[in-house]
Amino acid sequence: MRFLTLLRAAQPEGAPSPELMAAIMKLGEEATASGALLDTAGLAPSAAGAKVTLQGGDLTVTDGPFAEAKEVISYAIYDVGSRDEAVEWASRFVKLHRDMWPGWEGEVDVLKVFGPEDFPQ
Amino acid sequence: MQAVEAIWRIESARLIAGLARFVRDVGLAEDLAQDALVAALEQWPRDGVPDAPGPWLMAVAKRKAIDALRRRDSYAQKLILIHREAEPPVDDWDDAIADHLGDDLLRLIFTAAHPALTPDAQKALILRMLCGLSTPEIARAFLVPEATVAQRIVRAKRSLTDVRFEMPTRAETAARTRQVQQVVYLIFNEGYAATAGEDWARPTLCHGAMRLGRLLASLLPDDAETHGLLALMELQASRLAARQDADGEPVPLLEQERHRWDRALIRHGLDALDRAEALGGGPYTLQAMIAACHARAIHAEATDWPRISALYEVLAHVQPGPVVRLNQAVALGFAGDPSRGLRIVDELGDKLPGYPHLHGVRAELLDRLGRGDEARAELDRAASMSRNVAEQRLFRRRADRIKPGR
């Protein structure tokens, strides 16, 4: 089954250390080699994006940045045997930030992608 | 505790591979890893999951390994053996395990798919040691009793006591790699061939095989066919959800709703195919190239049939076989050359006795040539030969759609 994870955090002060970036790369390689990680990438600040809204029949396009306190920093797609496995990978990812970026705070949404197992025949 | 199970899936292969480096016995390494799992199941629900669960499991297994080695009469001899082979002393385990992880995982795969084992044993061992599946999960996936799988694993581990935990020699490597690929593809096909709907345990096999394929691709990045196999499995698996309709009836490829195909798997599979082609390819790669022709076609009518029939022509030379020829005949029919397709089918003669699809293909080609009555007769034969009820209905449905012959 497949999970989409979205990392949200306040737009960080400064850049992550090279050590953290190296550790993130290594974890990514590990997750890819084990067959769990299908895809991942970092996302540019929402200032580079836009929002398309439909409200009361009106369609509006608003340029970024969005007003939310937290920005979506990156996404990943995992192909795993259970939700717990996706949660475990997400936890490892967050632990790297805890251990190598003092004061960093953020959250990961672990979202299930609908699959055949959700529609039992 | 489900978190333990999830961590086990992630860690078990590395744990077993690392342990096997030191105890030099894959069966013992697997037992030790299982002991560590039991310890985790006892302690984690009580004390919480440790911050670094992988190293925790390894530390427990390591202690048990040292105990086990001490208990063995041959402990002293083992030490001598270890030193003679210039392996690091036991204190340096953790570093050595990290440094050699890739090699050890490869050795573990080669050992689990060792030619001394039966194919059933190879499949069970690989799923257990490399995918972290439990005996009940493996039994459910293969639709056999748990006791059968347990016995296969015990016997397999016993056969492996005489097998050294080492890489095949340079001369053997190619053949042994093919063997590993074959076992992985067998696991995949056992899951894929099962008519979905009967039991969702079967996708466990497809999923497990794809994960193995990705692991292999990371361990053997220069082997074209490893990437080709991965591409083939992912491209085929991308169609899993579309292969049956709401009533559980099989849907032929060309009638499938393509929006139900799994785009993420297709993209991943096409990436793997690019790597395979760049490295030279082989039979798996050719089959993946054929699967890619379907994956790339927005709708059935957009399929590049001339390319597919050309690829089958090449495949028939690399990996000769009647089913490949039969598929080529199908492609020729679609590519606008049904008479050549029919000649190929007729050349097969009795090479595929009792194979209903041969008659299904013959019917398709005859129909294209305007010989509807003969086509219907072939479909009747196909239906009466098939042992699968859903497939019989499919043949009969096709027969009903054929216009009378001219």
Image (cartoon, coloured by chain):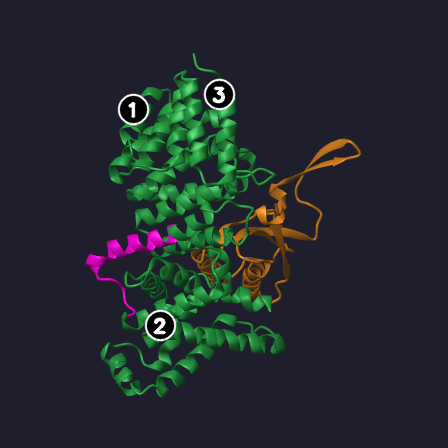
Chain colours: A orange, B green
Q: Position of residue B152 (x, y in %)?
A: 39, 65
Chain to which mark 3 belongs: B
Give the image location of residue B385, x and y in percent: 42, 36
Q: Label 2 belongs to which residue?
A: B20
Nearer mark to the viewer, of 3 and 2: 3
| Circle 1: element type | helix
Q: Quadrant of residue A109?
A: bottom right
* Prevailing SS of the magenta stretch: helix
Q: Residues within 10 Å of mark 1 (few under 14, many from 20)?
A: few
Mark 1, residue position? B343
Magenta residues, start to end: B164-185
Instruction: Tell me the crowding category of disc 2: few under 14, some 14 to 19, or many 20 or more residues within 10 angstroms, Cα based.
Output: many
Q: Are marks 3 and 2 in contact (CB under 8 Å)?
A: no
Q: Position of residue B148 (x, y in %)?
A: 44, 64
Same chain under badges 2 and 1? The reply is yes
Q: CA distance from mark 2 to mark 1?
A: 55 Å
Question: Type of residue at label 2?
Answer: Ala
Circle 3 SS class: loop
Magenta span has B179? yes
User: Which residue is labeled 3 in the image?
Assistant: B402
- The residue positioned 36% from the left and 69% from the top of the image is B155
Q: Is residue B65 visible from the viewing direction of this image? A: yes
> Where the C terminus of chain B falls, by quadrant?
top left
Left or right: where does residue B249 sit relative to residue B384?
Answer: right
> What is the CA distance from the residue labelled 3 to the residue labelled 1?
21 Å
As displayed, is residue B83 above or below residue B359?
below
